[in-house]
Image (tube, helix red, strand yellow):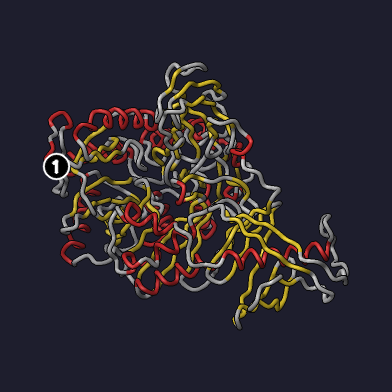
Amino acid sequence: MTTITTLLVANRGEIACRIFRTCRDLGITTVAVYSDADADALHVREADLAVRLPGSAPAETYLRGDLVVAAALAAGADAVHPGYGFLSENAAFAAAVQDAGLTWVGPPVKAIELMASKTRAKELMAGAGVPLLAPVDPATAGADDLPLLLKAASGGGGRGMRIVRELAALPSELLAAAAEAASAFGDGEVFAEPYVERGRHVEVQVMADAYDTVWALGTRDCSLQRRHQKVIEEAPAPGLEDALRTRLHDAAVAAARAVGYRGAGTVEFLVSAEGRPYFLEMNTRLQVEHPVTEAVFGVDLVALQLRVAEGEPLPAPAPPSASGHAVEARLYAEDPARDWQPQTGALLTLEVPEGPGLRLDTGYVGGDTIGVHYDPMLAKVIAHAPTRTEAVRLLAGALERARIHGPVTNRALLVRSLRHPDFVAARLDTGFYDRHLADLTTPGPGDPATAALAATLAEAVRATTYGTGPAPTRFGAWRNVPSQPQVKRYRSEPDGTEHEIAYRTPRTGTPEPYDAPGVRVLAATPDRVTLELDGMARRFSLTRDRDRVYVDTAGASYTFTALPRFTDPATQTDPGSLLAPMPGTVVRLAEGLTAGAAVEAGQPLIWLEAMKMEHRILVPASGTLTALHAAPGDQVEVGALLAVVQEDLDATPVPASVPEETA
């Protein structure tokens, strides 16, 4: 038996904070590691001790196993928990931890090795009787084999994954998938299997000890995905017949036993529309979505991981009984309406309602900064209730009432997804966003013009009270003079709609809308406005950051940029300028790219990576590259000039930026 007294978490952000929470409950001292970009991150502030990993990029910090082991030894840790992502499924890192005399809070090295390659794992699962999709040899694939799914043998998160629907596209897609897999995982092996249309992603949480006890902790449905990465997860997976649920549990236990598994792991399946399950992979680590299982079974999976790592048996031969339903939504700093582009910058406010059945796992608080180097997930919001209907309603309501100010997030998409008729009816499959994204990201039935009016009135009060300079500690007196109508202009973000609001400040001192019948100002301060709209009182709360105004009201939130102080970089550049669509790092250029070269419409010129998303900057129209301002390794800000193409006026334009995959 081993007693863990000091634990280093070889990770960052939300999962590090979540593991620290259990450690505090158990009296275990916590150690964080951090990159230079994370020097003031929440997980660093919450740890008892913290060790710097010099550098900012993952490759030189969180992916350096030697530095992480050295940090654990320097801090006096006796155990290492890998979290998820980074080195969590790296067998060599697990071995290095143990070779250093530290306890590894994870599965045996051999189990990680056996499951690391999807192709080898499938061979092993076939021997254990786990249901599989028949592999397809790309060299002999025919039209009857379509559609095909190409997948990287190593790694995950959608990197190296392609859907092939036309046989002529197979060779080029194989090359592209292999190149991306080699770049992301150092292994260019790619395999092909049938692509299951309208399939569901269903997984089983397992927990095993060293005494031949393996728990199957129910199912989870993770079908709502964007770019093969999960967005909304729930437990138990709804609508499964008892026989199918039993088959999934049995297959997951068989998979764990086949590799001598120990600790927490997840066996993932694809379930066809006809209800046939097929093994996808086994994740030899804790999953992002583990809180829904914890809620339904009333367990702490991290505490169980620590218990098993210390050599203790699981507390019972069978798992506890399940109760109720849980749903989790991943809150990302990204713009779903613009190809899921990740967003960066200051996170001014992150407030999610608290209450029975609600849980927030996050690596950020208001005042933190979202950088370019890491995954754009801000938080996970989890709701647990007696029934699925109640849990979904609770989660949607909590997200709707949350106050999130700063970069664009997917919050509105999450709320709409949870209330979509297909989701409510549990008609779930991995093509949900392919079919519904356009509808889910169109402007909703809200009233941005009235929100802009509230912003205008609050700003008028602020200007009247404070003047144009910085606000003093105490309020001043009202300017008790009549005024002529004044105009304030705002632009809605991110859709770009402009609003022009006319108002005046009468002798009463309270600003009021000009020529707006049916609207009456009940109260107005710099931070809160109450309007009566045709007899209905509505309250608006406001937060400012330079020229941005964030307006929250019941059922909706709005972001406005005050005009004309805001300028779009695109309006200040020459025709043919290719601008960075997001802040990030230039990772490569087209081969032989130099100024003066002839370029073709749609040709990729520059690859830009940020927050695990890669964008190809494409030539918008055929012409000549007259200037090149980007080089591999360059850090660029949004709107930065990357290149200039002098266009052939007869050319057909194409979009200049295309996202490839996320990890």
Which percent across, then down, holds residue 167? 19, 34
Which percent across, then down, holds residue 22? 49, 57
- Against 253, residue 326 (above or below) is below
For label 1, the residue is 134
Few, some or many C-alpha atoms within 10 Å of disc 1 (few <14, some 14-19, many ≥20)?
A: few
Which percent across, then down, holds residue 624? 48, 21
Q: Which residue sits at x=24%, y=32%?
A: 169
Residues 102 and 122: in front is 122
Q: Which residue sits at x=49%, y=73%?
A: 356
User: How many numbered discs?
Assistant: 1
Residues 496 and 13: in front is 496
Farthest residue toward the bottom? 535
Which percent across, then down, holds residue 81? 45, 45
Q: Quadrant of the C terminus?
A: top left
- Residue 397 lies left or right of residue 527; in this view the side is left
Residues 113 and 105: in front is 113
Residue 223 appears in the rendering: no
Residue 13 appears in the rendering: yes
Q: Which residue sits at x=66%, y=67%?
A: 454
Amino acid at the residue labelled 1: Ala
* Secondary structure category for the residue under label 1: loop
Farthest residue toward the front? 650
Q: Quadrant of residue 554?
A: bottom right
- Against 631, residue 147 (above or below) is below
Residues 280 and 197: in front is 197
